[in-house]
Amino acid sequence: MKILIDTGHGENTPGKRSPDGKFREYLYVREIADQVVAQLRQRGYDAERIVMEFSDVALAERARRVNEVCGRLGTKNVILVSIHCNAAGNGEWMNAKGWSCYTSIGQTKADKLADCFYQVAEEQFAGRKFRKDLTDGDPDWEAGFYMLKKTKCPAVLTENFFMDNKDDVAYLVSPEGRNAVVATHVEAIIKYIQSNE
Ligand SMILES: [Zn+2]
């Protein structure tokens, strides 16, 4: 199984930061992605980032990179996880907070992957807020996000708390929070792969 890690946005993307400008989504998710890939490799899994650039890479190009790997290795041998942080407002501190995970619309293998994410996240982020959409019988949210809709392999997008909520940002940048975000991705991916074996 090839594990592809996508990181949203670039240093040139407008917004995508905390209201005080100290937290930058593109940078945080790249740091998390590096650690996720390193830990998965240490444990014998084949993981890589699809965006090594610091500038924004267009969605179409990111999806093309994923689908190129799918074409080479077979769609069933690839998964994609896109790592993000959420935002509720337009540059002011907001009240919305919590962790969530998205899949494309409809039941696919991505819903199994998202289930693994929620199960692990509830342990790793114990006591913190979770955002769930239980209307279709599972906790993940479904949306027509480009990277979920246009990629051929099972794909999920994680929204790791809110970069415009003071409490969430303090948690994200704390050693405890960083470790839990990394561990959630590593353990959820391994849980999914093991459940498919
Ligand atoms: Zn994002």
Image: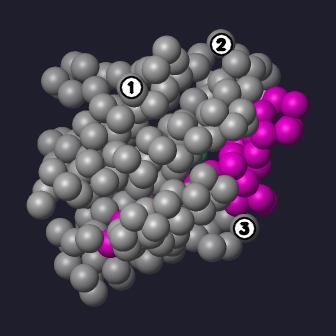
Residue at numbered disc 1: 122
Q: Is residue 133 shown above or below 37?
A: above
Image position of 158 (left or right of 67): right
Quarter of the picture containing the N terminus is bottom left
What sort of colour scheme is used for the picture?
A: one colour
Q: Residue at x 57, y 30 (%)?
A: 161
- Which of the two marks, 2 or 1, is nearer to us in this view? 1
Decide which of tag 2 and tag 1 comes sooner along the chain. 2
Image position of 37 (left or right of 141): right
Image position of 133 (left or right of 178): left
Image position of 159 (left or right of 155): right
**3D distance between C-alphas at marks 1 and 3:** 31 Å
Decide which of tag 3 and tag 2 comes sooner along the chain. 3
- Which of the two marks, 1 or 3, is nearer to us in this view? 1
Q: Identify the secondary structure beneath mark 3.
A: loop
Pointers 3 and 2 in contact (CB under 8 A)? no
How many residues crowd around disc 2 within 10 Å: few (fewer than 14), some, or many (20 or more)? few
How many residues crowd around disc 1 within 10 Å: few (fewer than 14), some, or many (20 or more)? some
Q: Amino acid at mark 1?
A: Glu
Q: Residue at x 72, y 33 (%)?
A: 174
Q: Amino acid at mark 3?
A: Phe
Q: Magenta residues?
A: 2-29
Q: Can residue 63 be found in the magenta stretch?
A: no
